[in-house]
């Protein structure tokens, strides 16, 4: 059994990465792992929503305090695209430019490559400096990525579908054979 303090230190990143932001009809909910109760936020109860100075977090202010939503939370990139335009201090231009700058990922098929790394599957995008040719690289990354999913009993899609607020690339191909 790992004590509370140790857990807080060592699992801190994991907790953050397993936290999921889900859009609701009137706002969003924050779902933390390990059985914590989801916290609901309605847009109309929020005073301000803005990015942190380094743009890695969204700072949400309520009458009883503020929360910081980190960009490694699942659903963060979806949330920032759904902030109502009534929040004048929110940087909508940054969001539009960010989403527009994303490139398609050859491994998972989601348009989520930012600064040469996919935000969804975390693969480094193939580039000219790699020793492997593009096809071999994509194939080996796909088999790495999907064999894990297969052994976990998860279904493997043969067509990329939009997820977490990202678009899918219609031209994406699965190079490995799934039997
Ligand atoms: Zn990807």
Image: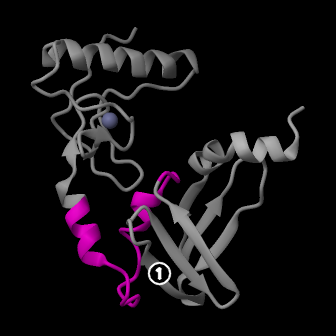
Q: Nearer the viewer, residue 46 or 59?
A: 59
Q: Residue at x 39, y 41 (%)?
A: 120
Q: For residue 140, what is the image quadrant?
A: top left
Determine whether 10 is above or below 143 in the image.
below
Q: Is residue 94 visible?
A: yes
Quadrant location, the C terminus: top left
Furthest-left residue in this view: 128
Q: Which residues are magenta?
A: 72-98
Residue 9's x, y, as percent? Answer: 72, 45
Residue 64 appears left or right of 67: right
Residue 101's x, y, as percent? Answer: 18, 55
Q: Residue at x 55, y 60 (%)?
A: 21
Q: Nearer the viewer, residue 173 or 90?
A: 90
Residue 69's x, y, as percent? Answer: 54, 65
Question: Which quarter is ligand 1 in?
Answer: top left
Q: Which residue corresponds to mark 1? A: 49
Quadrant location, the N terminus: top right
- Residue 93 is inside the magenta segment: yes
Determine whether 69 is above or below 51 in the image.
above
């Amino acid at each position: 059994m790992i004590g509370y303090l140790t857990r807080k230190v060592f699992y801190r990143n994991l907790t953050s990465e397993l936290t999921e932001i889900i859009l609701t009809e009137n706002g969003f909910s924050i779902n933390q792992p390990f059985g914590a109760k989801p916290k609901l936020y309605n847009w109309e109860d929020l005073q301000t929503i803005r990015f942190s100075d380094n743009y890695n977090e969204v700072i949400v202010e309520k009458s009883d305090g503020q929360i910081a939503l980190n960009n490694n939370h699942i659903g963060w990139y979806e949330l920032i695209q759904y902030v109502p335009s009534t929040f004048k201090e929110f940087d909508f231009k940054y969001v539009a430019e960010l989403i527009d700058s994303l490139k398609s990922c050859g491994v998972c098929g989601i348009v989520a490559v930012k600064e040469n790394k996919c935000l969804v599957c975390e693969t480094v995008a193939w580039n000219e400096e790699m020793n492997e040719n593009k096809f071999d690289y994509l194939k080996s990354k796909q088999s790495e990525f999907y064999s894990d999913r297969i052994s976990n009993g998860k279904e493997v899609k043969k067509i990329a579908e939009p997820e977490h607020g990202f678009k899918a690339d219609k031209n994406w191909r699965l190079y490995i054979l799934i039997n």
